[in-house]
Image (spheres, rainbow, N blue to C red):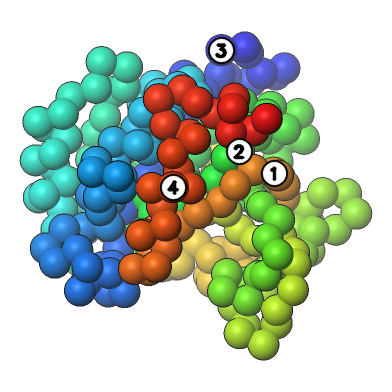
C-alpha cells in the first residue's frame, strides 16, 4: 500500500468497529445472532468485513461488542486472521456509538483512529480518506456517499470548502438526492479523547450534530453503500456485496 503524503499508512491506524447494537429490526430473522454475524451468502458478515479491511491495508481491528458479544468472541477465537491483529471489548450495557469508544479507548495506539459501523459497507478508498484527513489537518472526518433518496438516513450538508455545515436528522418527508453519513470516520486522538471524556452516548446526535459548523471534514465518495440493518437489506446484501468479495473491488468500480 502506498503511503499518505504526511501521515501514517492504514497499517498504523487502528480500526474500531462498532458492533454492539441490539439489532431489533432483525430479531425475527437472526434469532440469537448479533448483526455482525448475520449470514450473507452463507458466510457471517464479519468475515466479509475483515477480509475487505485486510485487503485495504488495515492491520489492527478492535470490535466494540455488546448484545450477544460472546458469540462474536467465539467466532473470532475460532477464525483467527493471518493478516490482521483483532481484539474486542465488551460493553456492560448499551452505551451508544460514542459510549462504546470509552471501552475501546485504552486499547488504541497512535494519533489517528478510524471508527466504522459494523452493520454497513461503503465502497470508499480508505487510503484517499486518510490522505485527505492528514492533508487538511482535520480533527474529525466523515466519509459520505451520494444517495438518490436520503429520507431513510438523514442528510449531510457540506459547505463550499468541504467541511460539514450541518447534519440533518432522518425525515421520511425529506426525500430526494443528497449526501449521507456512510458510517466511517477518522479522528485525531485529541478529538477522540474529548469524546471519551464527555457524557455523549451517540456520535451522530450528540457529537456530530452539535459540532461547530465547519469543524468536521466531509469526504464524499461515489461508491456503493449498503447496510444490513433490516430484513430486506440483509436479504439483498449477498448480490450487492458479491463484487467486493475475494479481491474483486476493481471490477466493481469499473
Which residue does the numbered mark 2 point to in the structure image?
124
Query: Considering only order in the chain, which callout, 1 or 2, is on the residue closer to the N terminus?
Result: 2
Residue 243 on image: x %, y %:
49, 35
45 or 70: which is nearer to us? 45
Q: Are marks 2 and 1 in contact (CB under 8 Å)?
A: yes
Instruction: Judge by depth and name the residue closer to the eye, 166 or 228.
Output: 228
Depth check: 72 or 26 in front?
26
SS at badge 4: helix
Front label number (4 vs 3):
4
Label 2 and label 3: CA atoms lie apart by 15 Å
The numbered dot on residue 1 is 3
Nearer-N-terminus badge (4/1) = 1
Horizontal side, residue 227 vs residue 205: left or right? left
Residue 68 occupies which quadrant of the picture? bottom left
Q: Are marks 1 and 3 in contact (CB under 8 Å)?
A: no
Q: Which mark is residue 117?
A: none
Q: Position of residue 16 (x, y in %)?
A: 39, 41
Do the CB atoms of the residues marked 2 and 3 lie less than 8 Å apart?
Answer: no
The residue wearing badge 4 is 239
Residue indicated by mark 1 = 221
Amino acid at each position: 500500500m502506498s503511503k499518505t503524503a504526511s501521515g501514517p499508512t492504514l497499517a498504523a491506524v487502528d480500526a474500531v468497529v462498532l458492533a454492539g447494537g441490539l439489532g431489533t429490526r432483525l430479531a425475527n430473522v437472526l434469532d440469537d445472532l448479533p448483526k455482525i454475524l448475520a449470514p450473507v451468502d452463507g458466510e457471517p458478515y464479519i468475515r466479509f468485513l475483515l477480509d475487505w479491511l485486510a485487503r485495504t491495508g488495515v492491520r489492527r481491528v478492535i470490535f466494540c461488542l455488546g448484545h450477544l458479544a460472546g458469540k462474536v468472541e467465539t467466532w473470532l477465537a475460532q477464525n483467527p486472521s493471518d493478516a490482521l491483529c483483532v481484539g474486542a471489548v465488551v460493553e456492560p450495557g448499551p452505551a451508544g456509538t460514542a459510549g462504546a469508544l470509552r471501552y475501546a479507548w485504552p486499547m488504541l495506539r497512535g494519533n489517528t483512529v478510524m471508527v466504522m459501523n459494523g452493520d454497513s459497507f461503503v465502497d470508499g478508498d480508505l487510503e484517499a480518506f486518510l490522505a485527505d484527513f492528514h492533508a487538511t489537518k482535520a480533527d474529525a472526518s466523515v466519509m459520505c456517499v451520494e444517495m438518490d433518496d436520503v429520507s431513510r438516513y438523514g442528510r449531510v450538508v457540506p459547505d463550499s470548502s468541504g467541511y460539514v455545515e450541518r447534519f440533518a436528522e432522518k425525515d421520511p418527508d425529506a426525500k430526494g438526492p443528497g449526501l449521507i453519513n456512510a458510517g466511517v470516520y477518522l479522528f485525531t486522538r485529541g478529538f477522540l479523547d474529548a469524546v471519551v471524556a464527555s457524557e455523549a452516548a451517540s456520535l451522530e446526535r450528540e457529537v456530530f450534530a452539535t459540532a461547530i459548523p465547519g469543524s468536521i471534514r466531509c469526504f464524499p465518495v461515489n461508491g456503493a453503500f449498503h447496510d444490513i440493518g433490516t430484513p430486506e437489506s440483509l436479504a439483498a446484501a449477498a448480490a450487492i456485496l458479491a463484487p467486493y468479495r475475494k479481491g474483486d473491488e476493481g471490477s466493481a468500480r469499473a
